[in-house]
Amino acid sequence: MADLPERLKDVRSAWLCAGTYSPMGYVLSLLLYGKKISRETGSRLMVSWSKDPELMFFNGKPIHMNHIRTMVAEMTSDAGDLLWKALLFKEGDDVRFVVPLAGIEDEDDLTQTVRGQSFIHSNGLAGKEGEMLSDLVCGQRRKEFLDKHGDWKWGGVRGYLKQVKKFEEMLLLLAHFTGGQPARGTDITGLRLVNGINRDRSVFVIDGEVVLVTQYHKSQAHFDAPKVIPRFLPPRVGQLMVMYMIYVRPLVDRWEADRWSLHGKLKPPSDFIWRNEDGPWDTPQMTAAVSRLSQHYMGRRITLQDWRHIAIAISKKHAR
């Protein structure tokens, strides 16, 4: 056994060292050669620009910047109409209001990590599902949700939840399209409303603006910490997010708890903004929403990966 280190050295030199005539050396040389060719030649451009800086070509097909602006503007307007006409139970001609975010800036403690908490709980904004239920019971839509005995009509509740999902899809795309450089699908669908057990919340209010905080984990092995990326939402999109968090989501969580109790089960509400029964939305679900809504608003289907290329090209052309 005395010569074991020498034998290991001989085997390592023959089979594992780069630059030797060995299988591993040959594989490494091919990888380095491919890397060099890739750096020198680059990849094919998926996006090119016309002489008109407002017109791009994606895979050879024209996309005008106005079409993208119109898509975002119309989606924002439609999401607002859906919120006020279908999801909230306010009645009257002038019932729309905004949440005064400027007063939250000093109260949203960024270091607060209590389980299940967010800026809502420290600013007197929690418990608004009671106001929602009061508006429902006293409003014209009562018969849609309650029978004559005061029990829930689950058919009406399911119809409401379908509208909520439609709103959540538009909210997700608006956050993805307007929140700066697009995050990966799993990064944005994994955002949390409140502090979880192992992860903190992802939605903050800073200086009167709504901020989504994503974390990038690919570099964690090198830097021993994920990269934290804040994404500031435009005012109208930020208001949609806050109204959803304060009014719509608590009522949805309450209905889901009531539904589970009918089967003798208890299930805590999810921490995630966009969630299924098993966890956050997956990337294919988000891609399907991007494809469907882009086709509806622009007349052209784009995927999640397509939008990433388009957004990067727009940033290089107009924002740098």
Image (spheres, rainbow, N blue to C red):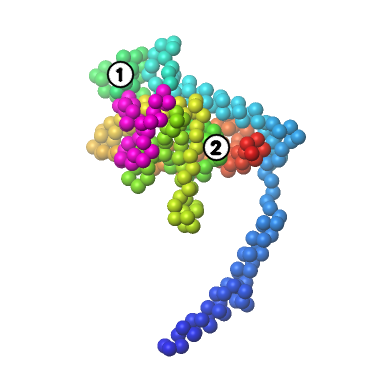
Pointer 1 local density, CA inside 10 Å: few below 14, some 14–19, many at least 20: few
Q: Amino acid at mark 1?
A: Ser
Q: Position of residue 278 (x, y in %)?
A: 37, 43
In space, the residues marked 2 and 1 are separated at their CA atoms by 38 Å
Whether residue 270 is visible: no
Question: Is 106 part of what is drawn in magenta?
Answer: yes
The quadrant holding residue 273 is top left
Of residues 178 and 274, the one nearer the viewer is 178
Residue nearest the viewer, comparing 96 with 251: 96
Element at label 2: loop
Front tag of 2 and 1: 2
Total labels drawn: 2
Tell me the tag on residue 134: 1
Q: Which quadrant: the N terminus?
A: bottom left
Pinpoint residue 178: horizontal percent, then vertical percent.
54, 33
Q: Secondary structure at mark 1?
A: helix
Q: In the image, what residue occupies the spot 42% across and 39% down? A: 202
Q: Is residue 174 magenta?
A: no
* Tag 2 and tag 1, C-beta contact below 8 Å: no
**Residue furthest top as drawn:** 93
Image-based side of 271 in relation to 8, left or right: left
- Circle 2 is placed at which residue position? 180
Point out the stretch of residues depicted in magenta: 100-128
The image position of residue 275, as x and y in percent, is 40, 38
Q: Earlier in the sequence, mark 2 or mark 1?
A: 1
Amino acid found under the numbered disc labelled 2: Gly
